[in-house]
Amino acid sequence: MTRLQALIFDVDGTLANTERDGHRLAFNTAFAEAGLDWHWSVAEYGDLLAVAGGKERIRHYMQQACPGWQAPVALEAFIAQLHGAKSRHYQSLLAQQVIPLRLGVRRLLQEAREQGMRLAIATTSTLANTMALLKHCLDPEAPTWFEVMATGDQVAAQKPAPDVYLLALQQLGLAPQSCLVFEDSAIGCQATDAARLPVIITVNNYTCHHSFPEARLVLDSLGEPAQPLTVLSQPSHHPIAVEYVDMAFLYRFYRDYCD
Ligand code: XBP
Ligand code: MG
């Protein structure tokens, strides 16, 4: 029997709903500042989230949605500069603490830490943007809570490729079946599956219509004692009763459904 040894967290959409009022606003501000007439609406941004990673998303948009636009000759440098400006605006939004953590995240992380559970991050976002989110939304010391921080700027291929999860596993020195991942999106879920990691999904407004055939459990949030979660999809053979995700639940769930 394998023992649960680490929890791995996706960041955007899982720890906090950063996309609509964080990353999207920062992209739009950077576009305006660069004199571009691009503006990503809430709905259009939802479609663009199918492309993981800020630089990759900008490149995809240029190629797909701007047919008449004359791309600069030094395209990669242009994208890097635009993304650098976007990251500056994103980090300044985070510093204003306008983006709260999702329900139950702080409680579960605190309990996991108290119990000595190993913690890791696996995100498409950059290390700098991830550090800013952890510091401003969770705790100034939060970057030290995570023994491993695998980020998009450290790997060749973004989710749904498994690279960032494989990097997290390599740095943890663990086999996938000793870990449990928290994700929010279909591409994130596919990445965990490709890395053979068991995953629990907590959906949000951008991902509630995604399908998660590879997930062990799909929830609307981690819940809190006074704000119970809703189970959206679960193992078919045995209905799960849970009001909020805590460590006792995770050990039980892991033993019954992941090991
Ligand atoms: C979500 C993403 C990120 C952000 C942009 O990542 O796709 O690309 O939208 O971040 P995840 P950067 O759910 O894997 O955390 O601009 O920092 O790349
Ligand atoms: Mg995510």
Image (spheres, helix red, strand yellow):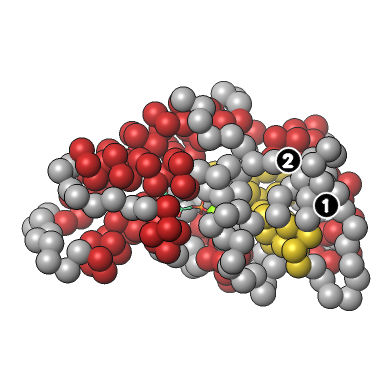
Q: Which mark is residue 104?
A: 2
Q: In this view, does 88 lie above or below 9?
A: above
Residue 157 percent across, percent down from the top left: 42, 63
Query: As shown in the figure, which amino acid type bears the numbered disc 1?
Result: Leu
Is residue 241 visible in the rendered image? The answer is yes
Is residue 84 visible in the rendered image? The answer is no
**In-front residue for pair 177/183:** 183
Give left or right: position of 61 versus 49: left
Q: Label 2 CB, ligand 2: below 8 Å? A: no
Q: In which quarter of the image is residue 17?
A: top right
Query: As shown in the figure, which amino acid type bears the numbered disc 2?
Result: Gly
Quadrant of image for the C terminus: bottom right
Q: In which quarter of the image is residue 255?
A: bottom right
Q: What residue is drawn where x is 70% and y is 54%?
A: 220
Q: Which mark is residue 193?
A: none
Residue 10 percent across, percent down from the top left: 58, 51
- Whichever of labels 1 and 2 marks the residue nearer the N terminus, that label is 2
Residue 249 percent across, percent down from the top left: 87, 51
Dot 1: within a 10 Å radius of its alpha carbon, few (fewer than 14), some, or many (20 or more) residues?
A: some
Q: Do the residues labelled 1 and 2 touch (CB within 8 Å)?
A: no
Q: Mark 1 points at which residue?
A: 250
Q: How many marks?
A: 2
Mark 1 or 2: in front is: 2
> Distance between the Cα atoms at labels 1 and 2?
13 Å
